[in-house]
Amino acid sequence: MKLSHNRLAVIFNPMGGSAKSGTIDKLQAACKARGIELVKLTTTADFGSAKRLSAKAVARGDIDAVIACGGDGTACQAAEGLFGSGVPLAVFPAGTGNLFARAFYASPDPERFVAMIVNGQAQPVDMVRLVIVDNVGMQQEQLFMVAAGFGKISDAISFATPRMKRIFGKLTYAVRMLKASLRPDSVRYKLTPLLPDGQTDLQVKAVELQASAMFALSAVPPSMLTLSRGCNASDGLLDVVAIKANNFGSLLQFSARMATGRPDRSVNYYRMRVAAVRIETSSPVTPNIDGDPGRSTKSMELYVLPKAVQIIVS
């Protein structure tokens, strides 16, 4: 990528692992070695802090690219602040899950990461707008880049506490998902494809099914590639995948299909590929949005925003 100003901005949590491990200092040293200034922008505990910081970087007018150094929440917020600006984003993984980074990056070190920014080419990536009507009738909107999950198995991921993740790391997710699989508590879902303006697509019928877990995927990390073959973060489409297994035994059978790389051959698998969809549920679910919990709801709509942000990837 041709740098016009030789100036990058990095968004990070000054109390997070990246700062404590010296990653930010190493990124700064790698930039300095190439004659690039690294502007440090530190997040706060306020929700949306990373979004405001990336928008601030755009407003300066002299930032060639923004680096989000953190987990999926930081990456998505930073991307939202860059929405439509044309200023590209690069993501240095420094969280626990790092779904976005695992979908698009090798494991970078600071020197290789800066080289990737300088020599790489930004590509357009979709974002997804999630519109929720919560349990008290309030409407809320949120953007995400990778996936939203629903159901008890998805909850096992999103409700892992920061303390658990600090102590046990990725093992936290495995243990919580195993526990959830013992009693998955399936939910009835109604999926209605929509037109981009939110109107019902009269040419396509709604689908109703019982599922223990459902995922709305814009991108898929390598460890989950078999869950939705052909899922593409730049095609303007969303893959809605349901796991219909509703007890521990059927979940084991589905897991076996996953292990062979062909979950689509399981009777407990369903996929719909759409640009927009309304999801209604028989009981409240809490969306797991790029690894973080949203608001409990029985009604939501998802819209793909094609090529919303420019991402520099390895």
Image: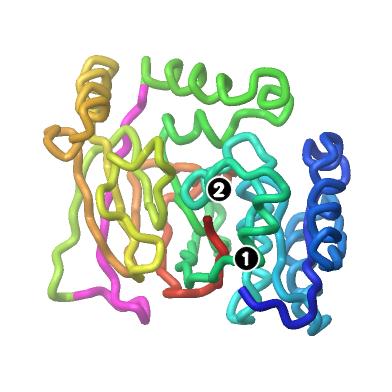
Look at the image and say whether residue 41 sits in the magenta stretch: no
State the mark number for residue 79: 1
User: Does the magenta-highlighted stretch encompass residue 198?
Assistant: yes
Q: Residue at x 29, y 41 (%)?
A: 227
- Where residue 60 appears, as percent x and y from the top left, is 83, 81
User: Between residues 89 and 113, which one lies in front from this camera angle?
Assistant: 113
Residue drawn at the location 16% of the way across and 40% of the way down: 264
Count the marks: 2
Judged from the image, the secondary structure of the residue bearing numbered disc 1 is helix
What secondary structure characterizes most of the magenta part? loop
Q: Amino acid at mark 1?
A: Ala
Mark with earlier residue (1, 2): 1
Q: Are marks 1 and 2 in contact (CB under 8 Å)?
A: no
Figure quadrant of residue 139: bottom right
Rendered position, 312 above or below 280: below
Q: CA distance from mark 1 to mark 2?
A: 13 Å
Q: Position of residue 15 (x, y in %)?
A: 87, 40
Q: Which residue, given by chain and number where applicable, does mark 2 sit on?
A: 101
Q: Is residue 147 left or right of residue 275?
A: right
Give, as a single range, the part of the protein colored magenta.
Answer: 184-201
Q: Is residue 164 above or below residue 240?
A: above
